[in-house]
Image (cartoon, rainbow, N blue to C red):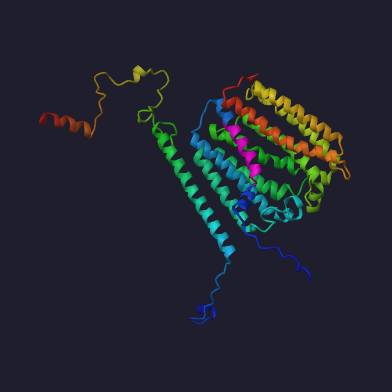
Amino acid sequence: MSGDGLKKGDEQFPEPAHLDDAARAAQKRRNLWLGLALLGFVFLVGLTTFVRLSGSEDNQANFYYNMNQTGQEEAPALPPGMSPDQAAPPANLSTEPVGPDATADEEETPEQ
Amino acid sequence: MTDAPATPQKRYGTAGDYVQLLKPRIMMLVVFTAVAGLIAATGVTGQSMNPVMAAIAVLAVALGSGAAGAINMWYDSDIDLVMTRTSTRPIPSGAVPREEAIAMGMIMSGVSVLLMWLASNWLAAGLLAFSIFYYGVIYTMWLKRSTPQNIVIGGGAGAFPPVIGWAAVTGNTPLDAWILFAITFFWTPPHFWALSLLAHSEYEKAGVPMLPVTHGAKATRLQMLIYTVVLAAVSMMPLVTGLGGWIYGVVTGVLNLAFLYFAVRVWRSHAGDSGAPGADQKLARSMFLFSILYLFIVFAALIVEHAAGLHFPVGGL
């Protein structure tokens, strides 16, 4: 302000607009409608997100994940000429899940 | 005591004024044709859309239509003030400031496209964005004031909704979707020129180069007949592709005969000429009203066939 040649305390602020009753009522109505419109928009965005996420659980929308019905990733396509039997793991190889949980179960059994 | 000149009382916009800004009558037609595209796509392809998402997609089309209407009213407020028919619109009547109208149009455009994208896919959202741009910029700001073909080319904007509805369901736009586009596209000139025959002096006053203003009423009546003949042919194309079945064929066939009857009678009349008999003017008005009914019933026939399981194809490519 001082750079513009005004001393401290000389700042001129514009007079606030004085609205008559009708203008104030109209402004209130507009604000109400704007608020409702914003609320509606937020609701719709939330609704689309909810529907898409619900759909992705059933593998309907594939919004965030590309999963099959069991929740596991789709197996890649077999090379040409290979049958599903040939692609299957050997019979002596366990198909039980292997991981920290499985190990924990096995360790708990002898203690009981 | 002399009466003081009446000073217009300052008017504040009501919710109704803001609704008027969105051109609700056009919005109804736009929404209806979009729903028809959506339902026809489901019927033809077997692909379906979550009902909630479909409802939001339709709402997005309605908002997009309203946004385009607000942009149109913002830009055309100067000529709306000159024409009697449009002088009571919210901006020329002083109910809604121009800045508010354009702000509303721009915000609603963004919201509608975003909602469409969230509810369906980027193709439908892109088509919606383009149709708003087509109406708000290409038609309103460029074509309307520069060429007598404004209605013909600009009609493309109003023809997009069924394609958008189709794209929302399937994510693509096959030939059937573009046939629905073509029906609305070729319907627009005879529909709008019937109205402009009645109001050509208003358009002349506002400096808008509508066909009756630049080429006269006789040339306009001939063009209306030509476009009606083309429309009759195009509207039968769904029978060839299998999009429309027996019900659609019979209903649209009868409607085409009636539309052609109106077009021939208007062509032979003096509607739009200076000093034309009232009966001729009334005929042009009847054709205008009938054309609205025509589009509603044609698309309703498609909806009934595909939504109620009454689709019995005549042919099919």
Is B170 displayed left or right of A100 in the figure? Answer: right
Quadrant location of the C terminus of chain B? top right
Magenta stretch holds residue B29: yes
Residue sitting at x 83%, y 32%: B265
Q: Quadrant of residue A23?
A: bottom right
Q: Which residues are magenta?
A: B23-38
Task: Give the percent coordinates (x, y) of residue B143.
Answer: 73, 47
Q: Position of residue B145 (x, y in %)?
A: 75, 50
Image height check: is A25 above or below A16? above
Residue B75: in magenta span:
no
- B107 to A88, vertically: above or below: below
In terms of depth relative to the viewer, which is nearer, A5 or B260?
B260
Q: Which residue is located at x 73 percent, y 54 percent?
A: B87
Check the image and name the residue furthest to the left: A111
Q: Quadrant of the N terminus of chain B?
A: bottom right
Q: Residue at x 89, y 44 (%)?
A: B275
* Residue A69 x %, y %: 38, 28
